[in-house]
Image: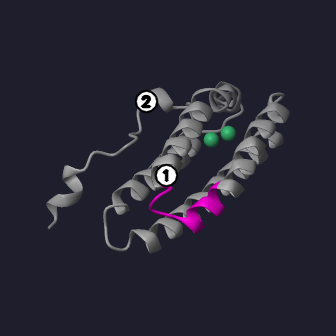
Amino acid sequence: MGTKRELKMPILQWSEKYSVGLKTFDDEHRKLIGFINDLCDIVSTENAAVEIPKIFNSLVEFTLYHFVHEEETMREHGFLGLPEHILEHNKIRDRVADMIVKVISDPVGELDDLVTLLIDWLEDHMNTVDKEYGPFLKEKGIS
Ligand SMILES: [Fe+2]
Ligand SMILES: [Fe+2]
């Protein structure tokens, strides 16, 4: 039935409080939030064991793309906080490898832990280091 999705509350919802002040990166963060919600939506369906790894794979690919996009943009404009930002991205990149192993071994059983971890890092990262580049890049003409 078409009502099923409307009845579900997203586990994480985009809010202005997450905005880094640049549409380009806010849109990418929205997309990451969307993947996390997709994972939660699929968990109670028959295809969960097959679909969770697929969605997770898309989320990982997009996360890695997003990190490079941020880093390249900061580098291009000479943002001094770049080395620290890369260190933070690398911490997450390292954890992704562990997550992949877990998702492959038990996608449904590991989902709660996985989603908790994803929300933690995404909220924390968007609200701290990502907000640092916002005003600087805005001044450089990025929107
Ligand atoms: Fe970042
Ligand atoms: Fe980001």
* Label 1 CB less than 8 angstroms from ligand 2: no
How many C-alpha atoms fall within 10 Å of the one at disc 2: few (<14), some, or many (≥20)? Answer: few
> Which residue is depicted at the point 58% across and 34% down?
126
User: Residue 135 colored magenta?
Assistant: no
Identify the element where label 2 is drawn. helix
Cα gap from disc 2 to disc 1, whole angstroms? 15 Å
> Which residue is depicted at the point 76% across and 35% down?
85
Quadrant occupied by the C terminus: top right
The chosen color scheme is one colour
> Which residue is depicted at the point 47% across and 55% down?
111
Please provide percent x and percent y for residue 104. 59, 68
Seen from the viewer's position, the closer of residues 34 and 8 is 8
Quadrant occupied by the N terminus: bottom left
Identify the element where label 1 is drawn. helix
Which segment did they paint magenta? 99-110
> Which residue is depicted at the point 33% across and 46% down?
10
Please provide percent x and percent y for residue 52. 47, 65
The number of numbered badges drawn on the structure is 2
Residue 78 visible in the current orientation:
no
Seen from the viewer's position, the closer of residues 21 and 71 is 71
Residue 117 numbered mark, or none: none
User: Residue 101 colored magenta?
Assistant: yes
Please provide percent x and percent y for residue 123. 53, 34
Residue 7 visible in the current orientation:
yes
Seen from the viewer's position, the closer of residues 125 and 17 is 125
Q: Position of 37 compared to 75: left or right?
A: left
Q: Is residue 12 above or below residue 60?
A: above
Give amino acid for label 2. Answer: Glu
The residue labelled by disc 1 is: 31
Give amino acid for label 1. Answer: Lys
The residue labelled by disc 2 is: 16
